[in-house]
Amino acid sequence: MITTSPLDELLKTSSVVVIVGPGGVGKTTLAAALAARAAVNHGRRALVVTVDPARRLAETMGVVELREEPIVVPLARSDAKNGPGEGRLFALMVDMAQSWDTLVRRHSPDAETRDALLSNRLYQTLTRRFAQSHDYIALDHLVDLVEDENYDLVVVDTPPSIHALDVLDAPDRMIEFFGSRLLRWLTAPYRTRLVKVTAKPFLVVAEQLLGGEFLAEVTEFFWRFSGLQPDFVRRANLVKERMSRPSTRYVIVRTLEEGPAEQSAMLGLELEHRGHRPSLWLTNRVLPSGRKNDSSVAVKAKPNVDHSLRRALSELENQAEAQAGVARLFPVGSAPEQRVGWQAGTVADIKALQRLLD
């Protein structure tokens, strides 16, 4: 029977669900589980967009390599059919390098600019190695996917980041970059004589540090990249608009460890400060209550119980009590909370993924 829990209400009524949280709390797995539940329980055509899934999760969803085109993930159904009107699950694994190349091809004003950027060594390093360049790309996909009639719901797994809100600030950072003093300095050799004179002290120091050849390549990259400004800024503003729509909801994932719980609490405050009130908290890897129940006491009281088993039970009870303390220290606030029980091992198959939020 389908429930009317806050989680299910979210999955029935949202067009975009953005999953945020500190690293290592299970965001990617829970993003896939949310999309699967929306498809199976609510008949939605749900697409999960993820950046860097664990190998086991990728295999669970039938993905063996990164792809820029969504694939269909077979679901476990009692009737084993995908009839008309039934939900379906899709997965898109973002390939950052390919996504940046696509953006450059789309926004370049001419073939010369396109080819010069794609072959530039600095461009290749920035788009393939630096995680900060990934934040914007994770959200850029929304512009097209939200308008795609093939999907009712898009679930976005935000990429790993030192600061959990980097991904939400990425569109503003992109817009600010194109108007920055740094960009004007870096492109000075291609600008007017007056600008060159003003920027000369900076360029002299940079050349001493980087070397003339490398500086020339850096300068050319930023000059070429600045030519993409009008379309990039327009696109970044579209991303911001999609992120602020009422049908875009935010889910915070946390665990009941003091560090992640504290980071998640701060994340909740920062989300609200940006006008994105969290719609749901998912508290992952929760152990049963730490109170000593009758069965646990009875097991440990038996004289023939293995010492290692008795010790393991005690450790679990202590950990559960510690989790309860962290939950009291960092409450979730006004948004509803859904707790996800501790799983032994990884999610091994699609059935386990579908059951994860039950």
Image (cartoon, helix red, strand yellow):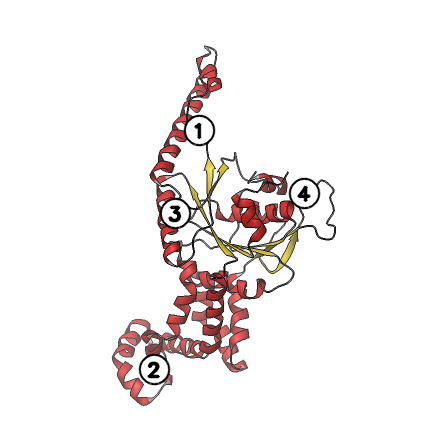
Residue at the spot 59% in from the left edge and 39% down from the top edge: 355
Left/right of residue 163 with respect to residue 33 in the rendered view: left
* Residue type for callout 1: Ser
Q: Identify the mark nearer the N-term, 2 or 3.
A: 2
Residue 289, disc: 1
In the foreground, 95 or 79: 79
The residue singled out by tag 4 in the image is 76
The residues tagged by marks 1 and 4 sit, at their Cα atoms, a distance apart of: 31 Å
The residues tagged by marks 4 and 3 sit, at their Cα atoms, a distance apart of: 33 Å
Tell me the mark number nearer the camera, choosing from 1 and 4.
1
85 lies above or below 245: above
The residues tagged by marks 2 and 3 sit, at their Cα atoms, a distance apart of: 42 Å
Q: Residues within 10 Å of mark 2 (few under 14, many from 20)?
A: many
Kindly indicate the quadrant of the structure image that contains residue 195. Answer: bottom left
- Residue 258 in the image: x percent, y percent? 35, 40
Q: Identify the mark nearer the N-term, 1 or 3.
A: 3
77 lies above or below 159: above
215 lies above or below 141: below
- Residue 333 in the image: x percent, y percent? 39, 44
Tell me the mark number nearer the camera, choosing from 4 and 3.
3
Residue 188, disc: 2
